[in-house]
Amino acid sequence: MVSSLTKNKKSVISILGAVFAILTIEVHAELKQLDDATLSDVTGQAFIAIDENNYATGDANVDYLRINLGLKIETQLNADRLEFGNYEREDPYGEARDADIIFDNFSLGTIYDEAYYASNPRVAKPLKSDGTEYSDGEIVPFSITDPFLEFALDKTTGRPVGVRLGLGEAQGLLSASIQSLTGDLNIDVLDRGEGLTEASSDGNIFDQLVVLLAPYLTSGDPLEAKAVLLDADGNPDPIRATMAGIPNGEEFVIRDTNFFTRFAISLLGPVLSSEVDIQGDDIYLTVQDCAVIGINTCFNLDTFNTLAIGEQTMVGDRSYLTGPESGAFLAFQSRDLKWLRDVSLTNPSAEDFVDATRGAYLNVPNGLTLNLNEAFQGIERAQTEYIDRGVGLF
């Protein structure tokens, strides 16, 4: 036994001696300049890069310091509740909400279910990176490329007045029950005559006649409008909102109509519940009291349970999620600020900035394109759990 211990001890001493000998070897290295040909074969990206900007078309009193993170993230995550901006705030629109942003059952990414996309054709269908479709039960991750942290600094004092977490280029499905929102979901309402007949009109008999005859009057001409955050009366409400839709006074546009359509609408105009204005080939219907020709134009946010973020491509009647989109971010600011929507722009215009209100602010790019009936009915939630716990996430 003693002999064995002695032998092991000698072996350990020999190994340690060899290690120390290697460490004490003198090493000489010469720094040589690489030629252009050699450098062209080397690629890479910094893990962290810092940019400082002052945009003439943005907020002239603010300097922006951005920390870019060279990361690519794929995730499927769930949270029972997401809450930002919980503080006492006087809301001029009268909404009594505890926080600027409240999402119940928040999820990024989904579990693929073909039946869901069959019953929700307006939700963009995700594809794998090679262009193939997912199979039932596969995890569809939410991808984030090159996220960043950006600080807004007061140019006079140098103190921070805002910070945001930008998702860089994002792609995937975001699901939640929205209880309060300060921000923008970017919901577009695009309808045609066929879609209008599916919507329910509570207007007068002439309103209902126009809705009934919509496929023949419009000949498939698109009706379009931009939805914003609203209060229950249809007035714009950018702070702690619970509804979205087309605000009172805005116009629903039927573009490129034919002569028969314009003639018919001009005859019915005086007896319709909505104000009608015909300009050239376009017909403008004014929204009032959350309705246009009796069709509801205000929708509860908690009915839009899944939003697709990313570049969306129409193939036939189906929308596919084919690439990432810039502009998704969560910001916190002590005063109203302008944030650049796409940080890759080198010479942005005023339209490239998002006007964020004080407090917590969420911006979701190209969230949904719906017709009026779909907007009223809402969007079902995609599956985000493997086990049905009876809480609507399966």
Image: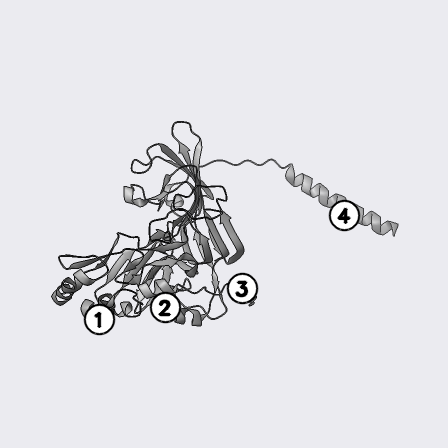
What residue does disc 3 label? Answer: 391
What residue does disc 4 label? Answer: 11
Q: Residues within 10 Å of mark 4 (few under 14, many from 20)?
A: few
Residues at marks 1 and 4 touching, judged by CB atoms closer than 8 Å: no
The one of 13 and 361 positioned closer to us in this rendering: 361
Q: Residue at x 33, y 66 (%)?
A: 373
The one of 238 and 342 positioned closer to us in this rendering: 238
For residue 39, what is the image quadrant?
top left
Dot 3 or dot 4, earlier in sequence: 4
What residue does disc 2 label? Answer: 121
Q: Could you say which disc has been placed on residue 213 in the image?
A: 1
Dot 1 or dot 4, earlier in sequence: 4
Dot 3 or dot 1, earlier in sequence: 1
Q: The residue under label 3 is which amino acid type?
A: Val
Q: Residues within 10 Å of mark 1 (few under 14, many from 20)?
A: some
Per the model, the C-alpha gap separating discs 3 and 1 is 41 Å
Q: Position of residue 161 (x, y in %)?
A: 43, 35
From the viewer's perspective, is residue 188 above or below residue 162?
below
